[in-house]
């Protein structure tokens, strides 16, 4: 069977060349005589993989030297608790912007540990925009300020970061990491589950400024303390070895085949523009998000008729475009076009939508 175009929000498609390389090395990684899955994480050969992955990530994202890179497990969802346990250690307060379900989950979990203030929310319009932020509503002595930079379910993205001064800005980058360059130094910490833009599920990446490590609350479980992992090079216990290996291959793909994050961003913007331009000119389909806040990774759209939406998703699937059904809270469709979605995939989707529009006019 031919490979389909997979528009899943996550886990999502991986670059074909990465999968081929992994297949080549599946039974026997280089001259190790074993699969990466079978290796001791303490072996010399694996040490090169994890160290190589970290140094590539540092290079590709231009991560400053005073930040630690941690390879963890538990998904972005575990960070919702790890962040307050490790960072909410001064005033016991934190600020949140509610721009969708993930942002809300981060807020709700943190609220179990301290005083959480909602600076702004876009819940009133089903999170179809990024709310304006009034600095007067910021907590001056907050221990951190949390945002979800790209809202996977609703398809919005912060195009301007909040000015939080000395309060560390913490961002969930799960669905936008590696999609374009970011200035890591603007953040106290960023984190991402790997399964959207970095590799397979099972790996969670945390990039954290060194001075924010080492102040966890006493009750913090050892495995939930950033210091544990920082002190042990993400090897306190067994890391998700195979996911880290694939992440390294993805980073090599970005660096060697794509040509770095500037190039990656150019490609991503062009892919998104192709779909948005069609949505803006279509008489049948329309995007659900206000123009200024549109994501280039997740693009929700509707026909306005739930039955027609259903028909579209079904016919699209039969034509080899899978996972286009929108999140249940938005309805309609959503095309997640992460780094690994080739330009031809988006082009083919737009052509399919044009045809569907003609046939259902
Ligand atoms: C997918 C996603 C999550 C949840 O990630 P898990 O790794 O499944 O815990 C959190 N935040 C955002 C923005 C996401 O896209």
Image: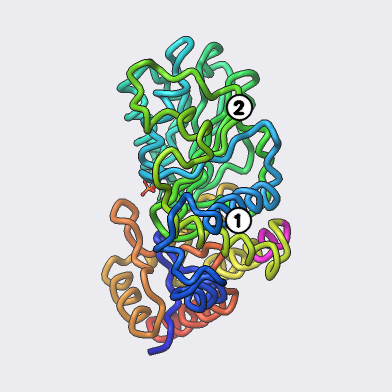
Q: Residue at x 54, y 75 (%)?
A: 21
Q: Is residue 24 left or right of residue 161?
A: left
Numbered label attached to residue 210: 2
Q: Nearer the viewer, residue 281 or 324?
A: 324
Which residue sits at x=52%, y=18%? 137
State the predominant SS element of the stretch in magenta. helix
Q: Is residue 324 above or below residue 162?
A: below
* Number of residues whose C-alpha sits closer than 10 Å to that of mark 1, classed few (under 14), some (14–19) or many (20 or more): many
Of the image marks 1 and 2, the number of the one nearer the N terminus: 1
- Residue 98, image x and y in percent? 43, 34
- Secondary-structure class at tag 2: helix
The front one of 161 and 168 is 168
Looking at the picture, does residue 128 appear above or below residue 287?
Answer: above
Residue identified by numbered label 1: 179
Determine which quarter of the picture holds residue 307: bottom left
* Res 305 seen here: yes
Residue 44 location, x and y as percent? 55, 54
Quadrant of the frame with the N terminus: bottom left
Task: Look at the image and tell me whether residue 291 can be seen.
Answer: no
Magenta stretch, residue numbers: 262-267
- Position of residue 87 measured from the top left corner of the image (x, y, whole percent): 47, 22
User: Which element carries disc 1, helix, strand or loop?
Assistant: loop
Residue 242 in which image quadrant: bottom left
């Amino acid at each position: 069977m031919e490979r389909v175009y997979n528009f899943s929000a996550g886990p999502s498609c991986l670059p074909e060349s990465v999968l081929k390389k992994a297949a080549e090395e599946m039974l026997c990684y280089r001259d190790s005589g074993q699969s990466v899955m079978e290796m001791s994480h303490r072996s010399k050969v694996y040490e090169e993989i994890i160290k190589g992955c970290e140094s590539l990530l540092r290079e590709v994202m231009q991560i400053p030297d005073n930040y630690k890179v941690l390879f963890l497990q538990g998904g972005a969802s575990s960070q919702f608790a790890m962040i307050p346990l490790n960072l909410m250690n001064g005033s016991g307060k934190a600020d949140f912007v509610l721009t969708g379900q993930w942002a809300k989950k981060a807020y709700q979990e943190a609220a179990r540990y301290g005083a959480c203030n909602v600076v702004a929310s876009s819940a009133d319009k089903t999170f179809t925009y990024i709310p304006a932020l009034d600095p007067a509503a910021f907590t001056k002595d907050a221990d951190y300020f949390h945002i979800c930079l790209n809202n996977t379910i609703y398809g919005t993205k912060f195009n301007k970061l909040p000015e939080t001064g000395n309060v560390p800005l913490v961002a969930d980058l799960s669905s936008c990491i590696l999609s374009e360059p970011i200035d890591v130094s603007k953040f106290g910490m960023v984190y991402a589950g790997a399964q959207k833009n970095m590799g397979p599920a099972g790996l969670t990446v945390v990039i954290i400024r060194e001075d924010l490590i080492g102040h966890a609350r006493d009750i913090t479980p050892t495995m939930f303390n950033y210091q544990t992992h920082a002190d042990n090079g993400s090897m306190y216990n067994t890391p998700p070895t195979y996911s880290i290996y694939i992440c390294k291959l993805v980073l090599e793909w970005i660096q060697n085949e794509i040509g770095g994050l500037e190039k990656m961003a150019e490609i991503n913007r062009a892919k998104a523009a192709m779909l948005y331009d069609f949505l803006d000119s279509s008489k049948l389909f329309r995007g659900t998000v206000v123009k200024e806040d549109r994501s280039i990774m997740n693009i929700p759209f509707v026909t306005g008729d739930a039955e027609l939406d259903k028909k579209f998703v079904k016919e699209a699937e039969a034509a080899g475009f899978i996972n286009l059904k929108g999140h249940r809270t938005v309805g309609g469709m959503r095309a997640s076009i992460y780094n690994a979605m080739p330009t031809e995939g988006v082009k083919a989707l737009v052509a399919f939508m044009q045809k569907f529009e003609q046939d259902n006019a």
